[in-house]
Amino acid sequence: MSILPKSTPLVAPGHTRPVTHLSFSSLQDDGTYLLISSCKDGNPMLREWTGDWIGTFLGHKGAVWSTKLSLDSSRAASASADFTAKIWDTYSGNLLHSFPHNHIVRSVALSPSASHLLTGGQEKKVRIFDLSRPEADPDFLSEIGGLAHDATVKSVVWVGEHTGVTAGEDGLIKWWDLRTRALATSITFPNPITSMELSRQTGRLVVTSGKTVAFIHALPSNNAALSHTLTLPYYPSSASIHPILQDRFVTGNSGDEWVRVHAMDGEEREVLKGHHGPVHCVEFSPDGEMYASGSEDGTIRLWQTTPGKSYGLWQGQNGG
């Protein structure tokens, strides 16, 4: 009987407060990628695919709730409790522009060409900024009355060239046509949305709400089978689908300190222990070889999809 190798996480230290959000870059031409982390310490960090620290973006004066990289990884956008969203040069770490808001900014999304920025947060408004004219007033995505949602906007994502998707604590996910700034369609969950991430490679939005994980087609379609929805025995804080195999997803849970791997039918495959606080965010790497988790304990842990395999800083058994 062969004993499967145990998953031993790599620990990426450096943050001094709870880690709030993790986001991987797209796969680069050389097969590598980057990881960017957000933290209540206000200092987003950029890392190599191995987990090694590259640099820290200094300039926010409050917790950072979301940071994302542009498709080509040359830019980063961040959302903060200091009432700003910021755009950074990822190569130099320099701040390129700061966009003031009137309340906490919870989420940001860059357009594919990094020409525009979407922001959302506790104002319940969603703004779209033209980065070629950073001093210009933003446009708003709104229905009647100027608000995008009736509660805090938890997540904004940019899908394809012309679609923005917003998720709120009002339980609504809304698709917007960014050419007309008009609402295209929406779906309602019975509970507040706790997370929504774009899985670019699978063309899906991965949503958590209450005990539900939903995998929704990222572009609105007339397809009646819009989503694959599962109910878990706990309240997931975040979820991420394997980008290539699409046969499993990982979750974080604010109720305990464990990272879980589930089959797509919801069956629990693995429970991974290592964090010393609730797990707020999880994300698969773009090659599917690992996933990262961020916790209240201030650490990021990197877990191998196939323990025992040589990959990055993990040296497999017998060089296997």
Image (cartoon, grey):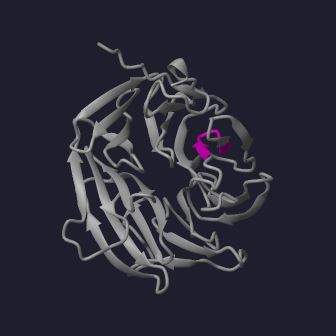
| Residue 168 visible at all | no
- Left/right of residue 225 with respect to residue 254 in the rendered view: left
Relative height, residue 65 to residue 149 (above, below)? above
Image point 60% across, 45% down: which residue?
35
| Residue 285 visible at all | yes
The quarter of the displayed image where residue 254 is located: top left
Viewer-proximal residue among 317 and 250: 317
- Left/right of residue 210 with respect to residue 99 in the rendered view: left
Relative height, residue 45 to residue 272 (above, below)? below
Residue 125 at x, y percent in the picture: 48, 69
Q: Is residue 23 magenta?
A: no
Viewer-proximal residue among 217 and 178: 217
Image point 45% across, 65% down: which residue?
124
- Left/right of residue 197 with respect to residue 49 in the rendered view: left
Image quadrant holding the N terminus, namely top left
Image point 39% across, 25% down: which residue?
272
| Magenta residues, start to end | 33-46
Residue 130 at x, y percent in the picture: 64, 77
